[in-house]
Image (cartoon, rainbow, N blue to C red):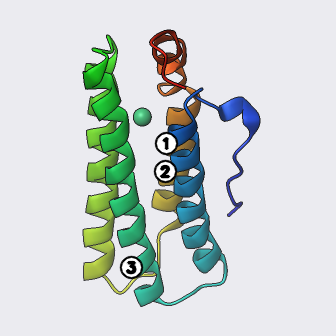
Amino acid sequence: MYKLEWKEEYSVGVKLFDDQHKNLLSNLNRIIGIFNDSGSKEEVEKLLEDLEQYALIHFKSEEEIFTKFKYYGSEIHNQEHRLYEKKINDFRTKFHASDEKVNTEVLEFLADWLMGHIQGTDKEYKRFLNNNGVF
Ligand SMILES: [Fe+2]
């Protein structure tokens, strides 16, 4: 599976969020790397936990700004975050309980969702936040 790459065109216009997105991509890349090298279950579990923790921190950062500036798109946006959190958590729980190695389909889902979210839903707040003086 290919590693993910952050590009300037993915910028959402807010430095903190761009930095967090880059970190999320490297978290996922670490998991993809271990998957590609067929690493151990323990290693994958540890990294999944890191990914989950970091995703929670990042979503919270975005949502705090949405609340602060009463962002009109926050409801739908936050729902997407909840779904992703659930997906990671479900996967982590299932993975922990099984003897399987990391499932490439779920890994691809996690990667595709994140890339799509950054380039779609996240991009939508760019103009709004920038107009409110958040960069
Ligand atoms: Fe988001």
Query: As displayed, is residue 7 above or below residue 47?
Result: above
Callout 1, which amino acid? Answer: Trp
Judged from the image, the quadrant occupied by ligand 1 is top left
| Disc nearest the viewer among 3 and 2 | 3
Q: Is residue 119 left or right of residue 68?
A: right
- Image spot of residue 22 (x, y percent): 60, 51
Q: Secondary structure at mark 2?
A: helix
Please name the residue that numbered disc 3 is placed on.
Answer: 45
> What residue is shown at x 27% (from left), y 60% (from top)?
89
Query: As displayed, is residue 105 above or below residue 13?
Result: below
Q: Is residue 64 left or right of residue 9?
A: left
Please name the residue that numbered disc 1 is placed on.
Answer: 113
Q: Nearer the viewer, residue 84 or 53?
A: 53
Q: Picture quarter containing residue 53?
A: bottom left
Q: Secondary structure at mark 1?
A: helix
Q: What is the distance, in whole Å, between disc 1 and disc 2 at their CAs? A: 6 Å
Q: What is the distance, in whole Å, between disc 1 and disc 3 at their CAs? A: 20 Å
Upstream in sequence: badge 1 or badge 3: 3
Tag of residue 109: 2
Assess mark 3: CB under 8 A from ligand 1?
Answer: no
Q: Are marks 1 and 2 in contact (CB under 8 Å)?
A: yes
Q: Quadrant of the C terminus?
A: top right
- Image spot of residue 58 (x, y percent): 39, 47
**Residue lying farthest to the front in this orientation:** 133
